[in-house]
Image (cartoon, grey):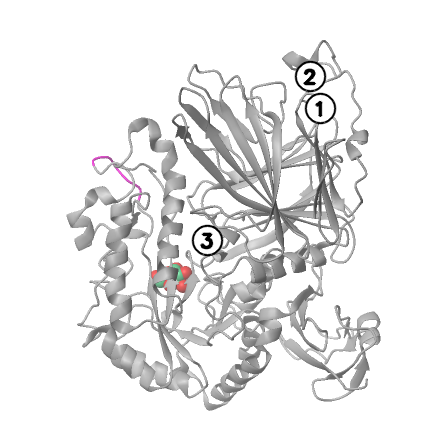
Amino acid sequence: MIIYDETTGLIGLHTRHTTYQMKADARGVLLHTYYGPRIGQDDLSRLIRPADRGFSANPADAGGDRRYSLDTLPQEYPCAGGGDMRVPALEVAFADGSAAPDLRFVGLERREGKYALPGLPAFHGEGWETLVVRLADEANGLRAELYYGVAEEHDLITRAVRFVNAGGGPVRLERAMSLCLELPEGDMDLVTFDGAYGMERVPHRGTLRPGVQSVGSVRGASSHQHNPFVVLCRPDTGEDHGLCYGAMLLYSGSFLAEAERDQFDTARLVLGIHPRRFSWTLAPGESFTAPEAALVCSGEGFGPMSRRLHRAIRECLVRDPYAGRRRPVLINSWEAAYFRFDADTLLSMAEAAAALGVELFVLDDGWFGERDCDRRALGDWWVNEKKLPGGLTALAERVRALGMRFGLWIEPEMISEDSDLYRAHPDWALGPAEKPRSRSRDQLVLDFSRADVREHVFQALRAVIDGADVDYIKWDMNRSLTEVWSASLPADRQGEVYHRYVLGVYELLERFRQTWPDMLIEGCAGGGGRFDAGMLYYVPQIWCSDNSDPIDRLFIQGGTSFAYPPSAMAAHVAPVPNALNGRVASLQTRGTVAMAGAFGYELDPRSLTPEERETVRRQVETYKQRWQLVYQGDYYRLTDFFRPGPYVAWAMVSPDRSRALACLVYTQNRAAGPLRTLCLKGLDPEKRYRVDGGGIWGGAALMAAGYPLPPQTGDYDSVTLYLEAVKGG
Ligand code: GLA
């Protein structure tokens, strides 16, 4: 609910459990007055106490009031260049070279429904309201529209900003963040989700120290190293108690999240496109829209924060061709065959997998051009008929004859120098062709800011996809952007290329969706190098990591779960010893962890023993019965990622709390270990549950006292408990 009190000027955005409040002061500066657990329309600008602070400048219209300074006021959209010395949301250079924008409140507009952002990902759906707050810098001819989306039921607030050059000369945006959040207390912890290739999104928590702490990416993708989702929380916040704020950017390119604890011990968070090598020139009349950010607040710890985000992402962001239906259990050829395959190998793998209940066969890298290793042929999107006689059409037909669907790996944004495409168009790669360009995985990046490049890639892939009637695409992206420069833009506009590249990726993804509305697209970037809410608008699932070791995955998937739902996390059972860390974990444990996501296999099913085949067959069958808990259930972390113990556990509970799946995986092992119980969460305390088809337990008892765990029998054991409420219980 959006309430605007015209008399006092107070603006309240109310969701079921939270209130977000702002107010333009007498000078038109838009103050941020509150965000937190729901309060009424109490005007909390009264908490702002003016004081004369040394060295804090007073704006020209302060009228000699030394107590009025932008350096001390909490603001919705603070600008650099004037008196506010903290991290800004906006940096602009005007035609005369001056750089001190001063945005003041002009008016606002409320609407039913959710605003949309053409060309950019955005939350959508029923039950939203929109607020547009108009700000203007009249002297410089710059206007800004702050967009707020309010989803009352989802406890979600989204933000975006649109700038219009209303002056007579060019305006250059140099930093245009999507979000600024001011908090009155600096005594907070900052939680970030960090890692590397093969170990993405592991949560890290630390005290917000005086000064600025930041995470970000300048890689052109949201990156393996940091995620465009951060949390600020009180130091005492845990899974089930305490105040926390989650801030998420719906963007898949370079980003920056900066948290500052300032001289007066307040906190400010800004989140948006990374300003490094970003600039955007607006001619008179032109506009620029900064991508959407979403905010969620929980007064009851990280658990509700994550569940609110999961639900909002599932119901108001992801556009899933399988909406309400189970996505197919797949088998992917990569870890089974890498580049060493021919049609018969693939087919015998598909045959073995089909016999175990697997429904989709995905042919990974290596099917096109002269691609027999990862050094060549990206860009040559024609089928290698030496490997696959009769092309993909023939292979797909034979796969379909087994009752399976057919899927394919592509990496559309890349080009190998050893490719026909590169030989024809060396200027289609990013960076000046006549200067040295960095290679990574021996490949260059196609200039996706260019419409002609995207058109070529689309047409080439269309022929392949239509030719084999492909049911699923894995859209990969296997390097960071370097030498970011486009032959299509003049020297003074090269600062636009990073962002135009992302817009180009979004445009092509949208075109794929429109052209093949029933095709499932999975995102991937060397595993989880582009796992963000921006991508989830275009693809319902993303390959979480190239690391499928179930123990490492506990942290990768567990960290990912702070922001993103299990249904978005593609997870496979892979061979042992694990390709990245050499660990040998049981097939059961590998299954337990992979089944907490969009499930599949990535091994050679022909190499399984009869006993292993039976285990796989049972896993697939179980997943088919329980998928709704993974896709629609409420997710509970049963262990604390910031105080790791001997195991990691989680539960998925149906929205009506009649069914639940609890899983536990040991990360440590020793003799004479204690007899443990697992305390569940999210059950109905009034209901009684049959556990694994055996004994009946009360929901309240299972949550308060726990369920007795069997003794550990080896390394990395796992336990799965399936709970079903008994009638009349
Ligand atoms: C990336 C992906 C892998 C696989 C390979 C193929 O690393 O993350 O899953 O598709 O590329 O080259």
Q: Tag 2, which secondary structure?
A: loop
Q: Tag 3, which secondary structure?
A: loop
Q: Amino acid at mark 3?
A: Gly
In the rendered structure, which disc, 2 or 3, sits on the residue that comes first in sequence?
2
> In terms of image quarters, where does ligand 1 lie?
bottom left
Q: Amino acid at mark 2?
A: Ser
Q: Amino acid at mark 1?
A: Thr
Disc 1: which residue: 72
Q: Is residue 150 left or right of residue 461?
A: right
Task: Please state which of residues 654 and 390 is positioned toward the viewer in this rendering.
Answer: 654
Label 2, residues with CA under 10 Å away: few <14, some 14-19, many ≥20: some
Name which quarter of the figure residue 688 lies in.
Answer: bottom right
In the rendered structure, which disc, 1 or 3, sits on the residue that comes first in sequence?
1
Q: Is mark 1 within 8 Å of ligand 1?
A: no
Q: Nearer the viewer, mark 2 or mark 3?
A: 2
Give the residue at x 26% y 55%. Answer: 457
Q: Is residue 355 left or right of residue 461?
A: right
Q: Tag 1, which secondary structure?
A: loop
Residue 1, x across and y down, in percent: 70, 48
Q: Where's the C terminus, which quadrant?
A: bottom right
Which span of residues is magenta-colored? 434-438
Disc 2: which residue: 56
* Residue 475 in view (yes/no): no
Name which quarter of the figure residue 107 lies in.
Answer: top right
Q: Main secondary structure of the magenta part?
A: loop
Task: Please state which of residues 540 and 436 is positioned toward the viewer in this rendering.
Answer: 540
In the rendered structure, which disc, 1 or 2, sits on the residue that comes first in sequence?
2
Give the residue at x 78% y 77%. Answer: 707
Disc 3: which residue: 529
